[in-house]
Structures are given as C-alpha cells and as structure tokens.
Amino acid sequence: MNKDFDGWQEIDWGIELDTLEFDLMAIKSHNKNNPNVSKAWNQWPEEMDNIILLPLGYKPHRWDKKSKLTEEQEIDLKLKWIEFAQFVYESESIILEENTFTVVGQHGSKFSFDASTEFSLWLPPGTIEKYSPSLRSIRNGAPGKSNLGAHIGYLEASHASWKIETGSPEDGLGFCDFPNHIKNLELQQYEAWSTFVYPTEDTFPENLTKLINLMIDDLEIWSILHQHELNRRKANAEWNEKWPNGRPDDWMYL
C-alpha cells in the first residue's frame, strides 16, 4: 500500500462499533480513496482485525460450538465482504444504519431487515438485540429447552429468522396487499408476518447481495413471497384437516 495513504485516517469514529455499518465503513476507508485501488476494491483493513467483527462476524468465546475459519476460508470470505461493501456504498437504493438495511425497489417498494453477522442470517428490522440471546443459546445446543420460557424464546427467535419487512400497510386483520405493479397472481394478499426469504448462496455476504438485488429489482421477490403464502395456506389447510378439533396442547411439540 502506498505510504502516502492511510486508511485509518479515513475512519468515521462516529459510527457505532460492533455493527455491520462500522465494519463495512472500515473496508470503504481502505479502498474508496486509496490511490492504489482501481475500480474493484481489494484492500482489507488488516490493522483493524481486533476491532471489527468481520470476516467471521463476531468474536467467538471458547465455549461457542462453531468451528473457526480455515486460512483459505478466511481469505475467501474477506474478498466477498469487500465486494459486498463496495456494492452497498455504490448503490443509491441502499441505506445502512448500524445493522438495519432499508432498500428502495425500482417500483417504489421499501424493504427493511436486520443483518446479523454473528448468526449469518437476517431478521426483522430492529430485532437483533431481542433475538440474539436465544439464537446464541440455540447455537450452543439450546440448553434449558425443557423450560417453557426458554423454549418459547427459542421458538420466537427461530421463527423470526430470515424474515424481512415489505413496508406494505396491513389491513387490520394481519394481511397486506401485493403491490399493483405485480400482475397475474393467484392471491391478492399475504400474511404480514410470513414474509420470509431464504438463503440460497454459500456465504452470508453473497446471500445479502442476492437478497438486496431482489429488493432493488422489486419483482421476483414478490413471486417468492407469493409462493410462500401459497405454501403457508396449503400447510394450514393440511394441519386443520389432520387436527379438526385443534392442535395438541403439549407445548414441547410446538
């Protein structure tokens, strides 16, 4: 790196530490104004490895039941996070505040979600602190799951995983209308809580990139949510047929 450029001097210390926003900003500070970096960003903030959470996404404790990255995995993941940081900062459709993304689609839809680098998943916006303790316990074997309170916490955290918000108003009964620019759908509404988009790629930065591109495109994501709503209604119908008098009361089987 050119000695005349010091990425440390580009750091915005006004951004909250231990957030994805700070980590991506650290990557930007070492690339955007760096005279040694061409069009594609390629510099990792090596001197900040003890400050930022990436590439793993969190600072593991010795009792965490998750394997550390191999050297090859770490190099590959760093490159993917660099690519994602450039993607975020060069897009006018993306706003990132701490861990919460807001994405404006090309047809005016406004999506939002929290990105948890610790668990490599997304959650409803503003819920990382709420669900992290339960997700951390699940990662470490779900201790105390025979306790009703802990069990419910695990269920809630699991059900919130991979959920986004679409920004569509509810009708008062818990349902939202599909937007007008989406045509020829079998259903006209979807359950407001059941807005799940599941990952398909190998790494979290790749999955985030794909999710955000779906949101910006503002088309295919609605087909995904429509199919999910069809599947949800089919599953509910099958459940009601199986237990016409109501589901079993034993909470251990929920």
Image: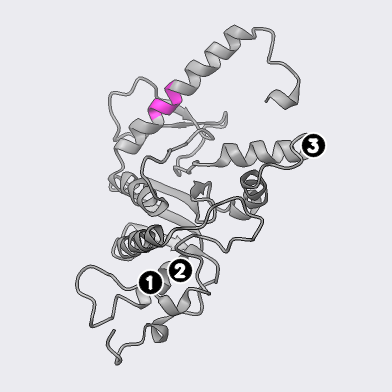
Numbered badge on residue 147: 3
Numbered badge on residue 23: 2
Quarter of the rendering containing residue 31: bottom left
Residue bearing the label numbered 1: 27
Residue at 67% across, 39% down:
154
Q: Amino acid at mark 1?
A: Ile
**Secondary structure under badge 1?**
helix
- Find out whether the residues at labels 1 and 2 contact each other: C-beta distance under 8 Å: yes
**Secondary structure under badge 3?**
loop
Q: Amino acid at mark 3?
A: Asn
Extent of the magenta region: 226-230
Residue at 54% across, 42% down:
161
Residue 147: % across, % down: 79, 36
Asked whether residue 9 is drawn in magenta, I would say: no
Numbered badge on residue 151: none
Residue at 47% across, 43% down:
164
